[in-house]
Image: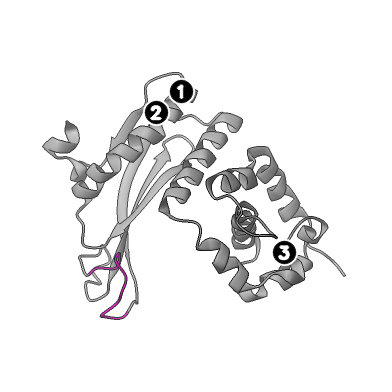
């Protein structure tokens, strides 16, 4: 059998340098035997980068790669086990993981965070009407597909390296200034840790569509 080696071995080296499995496990401690939640999250990311597959085909894929040398789920993996583990990953845990991941990346690779950019956009979906989704509300989309339900996404990135540091997904009918105001507390907490690493003040660049008296205050 020929196992894929290079890409996954290189990526796993980055996983170890940044302790990504540990970051996930600290945010969501394992509640059952077997693969930890941090390990599941890392494996999901690696599969998405190298060879995206549906979750039921994940175990067979990992057995034919370099991952079979380590503690991958392999034949014991099932999509039901994965999604049961993901039920424990709530919004607070994702925010903890995202912040810790960003801090580790900035610290280990010397990423410049003196200037960061914040912007928002939206994407239309093909979710049916009506839907139980609390995010996919009817609204105006940039591609002008107002007949479809959009999702809004805001992203904070470094200006120099275009490295994403923080994201927010929010309802499709909510205007940008409202979301920016709601995100300010998260941004402050997130960037205060970045500033400690940068050793200087951080400048945040954002679109004038986010400007309001309350947000400026």
Q: What stretch is highlighted in magenta?
A: 128-137
Task: Reply yes or no: does residue 141 show up in magenta.
Answer: no
User: Tag 2, which secondary structure?
Assistant: helix
Earlier sequence position, callout 3 versus callout 2 = 3
How packed is label 2: few (under 14 Cα within 10 Å), some, or many (20 or more)? some
- Kindly check if marks 1 and 2 are in contact, taking CB atoms under 8 A apart as contact: yes
Q: Quadrant of the N terminus?
A: bottom right
- Kindly check if marks 1 and 3 are in contact, taking CB atoms under 8 A apart as contact: no
User: Tag 3, which secondary structure?
Assistant: loop
Q: Image point 27% across, 71% down: which residue?
A: 149
The quarter of the picture where residue 40 lies is bottom right
How packed is label 3: few (under 14 Cα within 10 Å), some, or many (20 or more)? many
In this rendering, does residue 67 appear at all? yes
Residue 185 versus residue 198 in the image, above or below: below
Q: In which quarter of the image is the C terminus?
A: top left
Q: Which residue position holds label 1? A: 196
**Residue 44 x %, y %:** 60, 60
Q: Nearer the viewer, residue 121 or 56?
A: 56
Which of the two marks, 3 or 2, is nearer to us in this view?
A: 3
Q: Which of 207 and 127 is in front in this view?
A: 127
In this rendering, does residue 53 appear at all? no
Q: Nearer the viewer, residue 8 or 18?
A: 18
How far apart marks 3 and 2 lie (CA) works out to 37 Å
How packed is label 1: few (under 14 Cα within 10 Å), some, or many (20 or more)? few
User: Tag 1, which secondary structure?
Assistant: helix
Q: Image point 72% across, 55% down: which residue?
A: 8
**Residue 7 x %, y %:** 72, 54
Q: Which residue position holds label 3? A: 73
Colour convention: one colour
Disc number placed over residue 192 in the picture, else none: 2
**Residue 191 x %, y %:** 39, 32
How far apart marks 1 and 2 lie (CA) works out to 6 Å
């Amino acid at each position: 059998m020929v196992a894929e080696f290079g890409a996954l071995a290189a990526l796993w080296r980055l996983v170890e340098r940044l302790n990504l499995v540990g970051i996930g496990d600290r945010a969501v401690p394992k509640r059952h035997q077997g693969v930890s939640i941090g390990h599941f999250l890392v494996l999901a990311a690696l599969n998405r980068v190298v060879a995206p597959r549906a979750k039921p085909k994940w175990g067979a894929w990992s057995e034919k790669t370099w991952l079979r040398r380590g503690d991958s789920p392999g034949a014991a993996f099932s999509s039901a086990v994965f999604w049961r583990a993901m039920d424990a990953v709530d919004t607070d845990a994702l925010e903890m993981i995202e912040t810790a991941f960003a801090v580790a990346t900035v610290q280990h690779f010397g990423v410049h965070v003196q200037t960061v950019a914040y912007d928002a956009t939206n994407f239309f979906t093909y979710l049916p009407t009506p839907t139980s989704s609390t995010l996919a509300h009817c609204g105006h989309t940039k591609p002008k597909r107002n007949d479809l339900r959009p999702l809004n996404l805001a992203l904070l990135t470094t200006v120099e390296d275009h490295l994403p540091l923080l994201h927010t997904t929010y309802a499709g009918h909510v205007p940008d200034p409202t979301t920016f105001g709601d995100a300010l507390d998260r941004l402050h907490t997130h960037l205060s840790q970045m500033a400690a690493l940068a050793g200087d003040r951080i400048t945040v660049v954002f679109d004038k569509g986010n400007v309001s008296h309350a947000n400026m205050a």
